[in-house]
Amino acid sequence: MNTQKVDLYIVTNQGKFPAEKLPIVKEKLLSLEDDKFDLIQMIQLKDPTISLIISLFFGVLGIDRMLIGDIGLGVAKLLTAGGCGIWTIIDWFYIMEATREKNYAKFITNSAML
């Protein structure tokens, strides 16, 4: 794999993965063949900042959790009005990291399939 392509991918998407797992992402990308890299670039990663904004405005409804793929938790937040608001406030501090973890899991799953 071309190191420049990998570095560009890392710089472009570094905010979408946990910082401590970026070396693993880089290592996985370097081990891929060139034709597989295009498939990796097509993975739709969620933006943690957008998740936070949605959490601030619609967190009580669980939309933030549904956005990142936690459908069950989103429905639970919806039915409990965000855990009477407590769960919503906790998610304001946690949703960005949860989004990064979900992106990393999606990246690892898709790269393992290639």
Image (cartoon, rainbow, N blue to C red):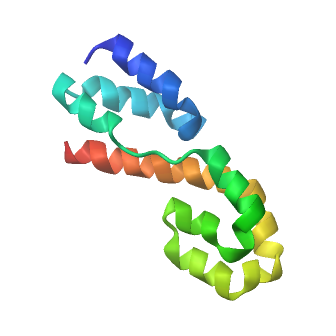
100 or 66: nearer the viewer: 66
* 104 or 57: nearer the viewer: 57
Looking at the image, residue 58 lies above or below residue 78: above
Residue 20: name its quadrant. top right
> What is the quadrant of the C terminus in the image?
top left
Q: In which image quadrant can residue 65 be found?
A: bottom right
The picture places residue 79, in percent across and down from the top left corner, at 66, 88
Percent position (x, y) of residue 40? 31, 37
Residue occupying image coordinates x 62% and y 69%: 63
Examine the rendering and report whether any part of residue 91 can be seen. Answer: no
Is residue 29 something that shows in the picture?
A: yes
Q: Residue at x 37, y 11 (%)?
A: 4
Locate residue 72 relative to residue 111 in the image: left or right.
right
In the rendering, at what x and y percent does residue 3 appear?
Answer: 34, 13
Instruction: Please state which of residues 20 and 95 is positioned toward the viewer in this rendering.
Output: 95
State how many labels appear. 0
Q: Is residue 84 above or below residue 19?
A: below
On the rendered image, what quadrant is the N terminus found in?
Answer: top left
Is the residue 83 above or below the residue 1 in the image? below
